[in-house]
Image (tube, helix red, strand yellow):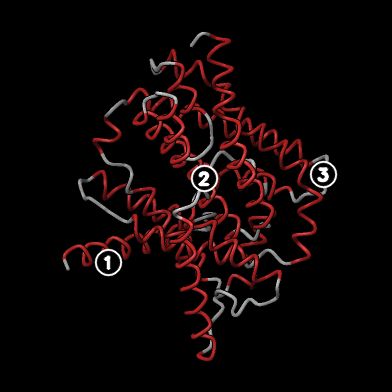
Amino acid sequence: MADIKKLTMVFAAAGLGGALTHALHVPLGWLIGALLVSAGLTLAGMEIRVDRIRSYGLVVLGLSLGQSFTPEIMAQLLGYLPLVLVSGMFTLLSGMVFLGLFTRGAGLDGSTAFFCTIPGGVVLMAVQAQRAGASEAHVILAQTVRLTVVVLMYPLLLRIFLPDHVAAVQDAVQVAVQGIGPAELPWLALLLAGGVAIAHLARYTVLPNPWMIAPCLLAIALQQLQLDPVALPRWIVTVCQVILGVSLGARMVPEFLARSMRLVAISVLSTVGLTLLLLAAALLMSQFTTMDQAAVLFGMSPGGMPEMTVAARAMGVSVPLVLSFHLVRILLANLMLEPVWRLLSRGLKI
């Protein structure tokens, strides 16, 4: 009961923080505000455990995102696949630019530094680091800092490079809450139950991020078969932003950050550099393709898939395109990072 009361207070405070930043017209305001409140509470000594809530939030997010994949959009995505593959490889390997910063600046061995620099996701990089004999704790710290910095940087970057898009989204009528009628509630319950069930089953497969990807694939399949029973309301994006913000802020445990303040500083510096590098590459690529500029910017960001896709949904950016960038990057990370590391370690003797 005490834990439920504490979590209720945390989410209430995070919701208020999100509402405040949203009222100030900060892009991704609900996520940013919740993150700052959660991080503040965690740094003040409060222990916040939201892993299970985050998992079920990812189920709902996956279903919501999957509903964006209409048959017409799926056909369009196939034409973009070559560029998405190239950008995925570039995004992953671009992290290696900062390899020396981690070895010399943070004093890490080459193996640990490699998995700290690659924007491939906290869990995936930690698992691959463990297989390579690298320091899993250092990799988790660096990757967590990267995710947090990217989420905090992107509102400013959006205002600078896509001011018209930000203004259009803030003024759009479609941001208003879309309701669910009483007759649709049983279908909504059935869809959510199906999402939870398939996510639990997917945990026993090799599917990355099963809590989000499996429900997303279910919703995509229903869309292609034109069997989608009910559209999830738009306010679900707001709820997911708050959940993701709280879960990111909850990682800022003082003992966790105190393990290596030098590594934290290097991680922040490298993330800023990597974000600007990939931003420039995304802006350049968008000049040679018909892909939406905002979608390319979100797709090539070094942020995490859940955070960037929910941000894209909140900003009115093409969710299927952004999600395809991140899914391809995850697939490439699973297939190529270990061979690349083996070649690199032999060539550089590290």
> Of label 2 and label 1, which has the lower sequence position?
1
Three-letter code for the amino acid on which mark 1 is drawn: Thr
- Determine the CA span between mark 3 and mark 2: 24 Å
Query: Label 2: which residue?
Result: 304
Q: Are marks 3 and 1 in contact (CB under 8 Å)?
A: no
> Of label 3 and label 2, which has the lower sequence position?
3
Q: Residues within 10 Å of mark 1 (few under 14, many from 20)?
A: few
* Horizontal side, residue 116 vs residue 297: left or right: left
Q: Secondary structure at mark 3?
A: loop
Residue 289 marker: 3
Residue 8 marker: 1
Three-letter code for the amino acid on which mark 2 is drawn: Gly
Of 268 and 208, the residue lying toward us = 208
* Horizontal side, residue 324 vs residue 205: left or right: right
Three-letter code for the amino acid on which mark 3 is drawn: Thr
Q: Secondary structure at mark 1?
A: helix
- Determine the CA span between mark 2 and mark 1: 26 Å
Q: Residues within 10 Å of mark 3 (few under 14, many from 20)?
A: few
Residue lying at 53% horizontally and 83% vertically, measured from the top left: 187
Residue 88 position in % (x across, y down):
66, 38
Residue 21 position in % (x across, y down):
45, 57
